Structures are given as structure tokens and as C-alpha cells.
Amino acid sequence: MTAMRVGVLGLQGGVAEHLAMLRPIEGVVAGSFMRVSELERLDAVILPGGESTAMGKLLAEFGLLEPLAARIAGGLPVWGTCAGLILLAKDISNDQRHHLAVMDITVDRNAYGRQLHSFIGAELIAGLPGGPFPLVFIRAPRITRLGPGVQALAKVAGEPVACRQVNMVATAFHPELSGDDRFHRWFVELARTAQTGIASRKP
Ligand code: GLN
């Protein structure tokens, strides 16, 4: 089996927690990345939680904003958790800025504020076997609009908290803090399918 090279954006935020979840997965080589030369070698990318404004500024400073957006638009599997979800969103309703702006969703930053500060629940996630998944929210964004090509994967109180648009996955919560590696394994499988798809299209 060819190793999957999964990079966690290492500019700021909860990088180590994602790496700790990824490293035990067989067939995965996981590391953090900050440079375009590193991005070029990756098969899949995770954008961690943290502070989206700081991460967005650093993405621009490191010259990563456009190359990363272009690779995602070209099919690179990506998963954004919390602040990472905000980086992916086309629209941020309570902010003038947007960052990578590749995913057809609108988000409201810090919408869950204190009510959901460290709120923990459990919900079924579409496509994830093994029963309800623990949901850890930390000043989470609310996903207020899903574009026509975006599928909700999980809901809390009728509102989407995880969604997918082809190669892009976004969660308002933090699977890397849940002690449950099923979401990371599912994302690696999604990325592997994308990799196989690309390989089989080659002449
Ligand atoms: N509130 C943060 C932001 O808006 C996201 C919080 C998180 O990633 N846990 O960037």
C-alpha cells in the first residue's frame, strides 16, 4: 500500500492533537507543514482549530493562501476543524474577511460562544460506523448556509455541524480532542479513494 502523506497546517493552533490521532493509522505518514514546497508533496491536508484570523494572516505571509486554495480546488482532500472550517468557507457572515474561500458554505464565527464552550455531546455522523461520535465544541462557528453541492454529515439541534463538498470536509467540532480516532480514519479513507481515483485516471 502506498503511504498517504497527510499534512497538518502547522502555522498555529491544535496541530499536535491531529498528528497524535494520525500517526498510529497504518499506511499514513503525518507531519506538519508551513511551506509551499512541503504542500506540493502532500496527498491530503488538515486545517486545525485555533484562531482563524491569525491563521489566515499567516497563510498569506507564508505565501500559502493561493497555492493551497488552488490545490484544494484541484481536488486535494482537505478537512478543516473549527477555525479550519472558517478558513475554508466562502462567506463569513460576521467578518469582512474570507480566507481560502473554497467551500460553498456560510459561517458565523464564535456563534456558539460560551453556551457551547467545551460543550460535549454525541451524534451519529453519516458514513461513520460504530454509533454516535463524541462532539467537542470550543467557541465553535455555526454553519448557517450549505450550498447546493454541500452535504450535512451531522446535525445538532437541527443545524449542521459537519459537512462535505466532494473533497472538502468541515467540522465545527474537534474530533482530535475526542479520544475517538474514527473520524481521522474515515478522512484518510476518503483521501485514499481520491488518490486511487487520480492514479487510475493516468494512462
Ligand atoms: N473561535 C475561533 C475562530 O473564530 C475558532 C475556535 C476553534 O478553532 N476552536 O477562529
Image (cartoon, grey):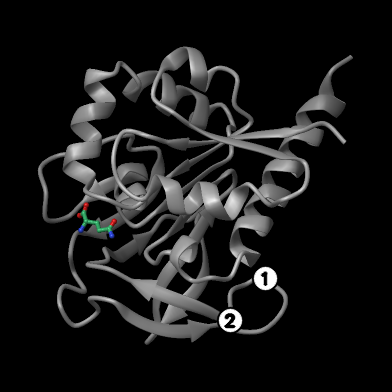
> Tag 2: Cα neighbours inside 10 Å, few (<14), some, or many (≥20)?
some
Q: How far apart in space, not on screen, are marks 1 and 2 (Cα)?
A: 8 Å
Vertical arrangement, residue 48 with respect to residue 158, above or below: above
Assign ligand 1 to one image quadrant.
Answer: bottom left
Residue holding disc 2 = 124
User: Do tag 1 and tag 2 residues touch (Cβ < 8 Å)?
Assistant: yes
* Amino acid, disc 2: Leu
Q: Does the rendering let one see residue 98?
A: no
Residue in view at x 18 percent, y 64 percent? 110
Who's the residue at 22% across and 76% down the image? 117
Residue that carries the numbered disc 1 in the rendered image: 128
- Ligand 1 has an atom within 8 Å of the beta carbon of the residue at disc 1: no
Residue 180 vertical placement versus 190 (above, below)? below
Q: Amino acid at mark 1?
A: Leu
The residue positioned 64% from the left and 30% from the top of the image is: 43
From the image, which quarter does the C terminus lie in?
top right
Residue at (76, 33) in percent of width and height = 3
